[in-house]
Image (cartoon, rainbow, N blue to C red):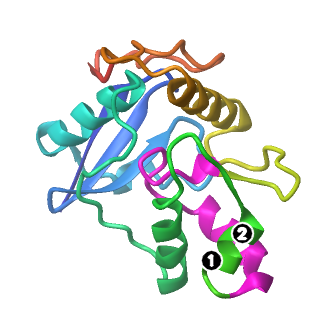
Amino acid sequence: MKQHTVVDSPCGPLTLVAEDGVLCGLYMTDQRHRPPEETFGERDPAPFGETEEQLAAYFAGELTEFTVALRLNGTPFQRRVWDRLRRIPYGETRTYSRLAEDLGNPAASRAVGLANGRNPIGIIVPCHRVVGSDGSLTGYGGGLHRKRHLLDFERGAALFPSPAGRGAPPRVPGASAPSDGSAAVV
């Protein structure tokens, strides 16, 4: 059984989706490859307490690695790519070709890019940390402005950590707050 909730973030509203109580989706507004709303199940914030806490800590600059349980639904190749994404350290980036090499198939950088674009759990499975071979920002399902914001935020938090955290980062330009009174993450 699927359930969902919508939480606020500096990237705008995030839709969290759980299947049998396990996080299986984190989607931004206007995200490419976002499933239809009717597939998210009933609205119920109950299964998302830990996810909301970890997202709040991430956006406060206090968490660099998520530990929430995930259900990554995809092909075996996609799941291998998504597993590699989770190994990219906070504040760092990798190229599509480097990920393909890490998977043992240097010629698969395009397939890696396609799998990266189908990541169902953005931010937590950090597909925003993948860049072009020349270090340029390339496609991001949530929009390049959000990718830039997340990378700048992580680099800033990694460069200037403080024991009390950094506080909430500024909102992404163009990201809106939920208009339905949803729970806030930050």
Give the side of residue 100 with respect to residue 52, left or right.
right
Q: Quadrant of residue 185?
A: top left
Where disc 2 sits, the SS reads: helix
Q: Amino acid at mark 1?
A: Asp
Query: Dot 2, how many residues are within 10 Å of its Cα: few (below 14), some (14-19), or many (20+)?
Result: some
Which residue was labeled with disc 1? 102
Q: Amino acid at mark 2?
A: Arg
Residue 17 rendering spot, x and y as whole percentages: 31, 50
Give the residues in magenta. 105-129
Residue lying at the far left of the rendered structure? 46
Locate residue 97, reporting x and y percent.
Answer: 76, 70
| Percent position of residue 68, x then y | 24, 51
Horizontal arrangement in the rendering, residue 14 relative to residue 92 (left or right): left
Give the labeled residue for mark 2. Answer: 98
- Please tell me whether mark 1 sits on a helix, a strand or a loop: helix
Residue at position x 34%, y 27% in the image: 62
Say whether marks 2 and 1 touch (CB < 8 Å).
Answer: yes
Residue 44 in view: no
Above or below, 8 against 139 in this view is above
Residue 128 included in the magenta stretch of the image = yes
Q: Which one is in front, 129 or 157?
A: 157
Camera sees residue 178: yes
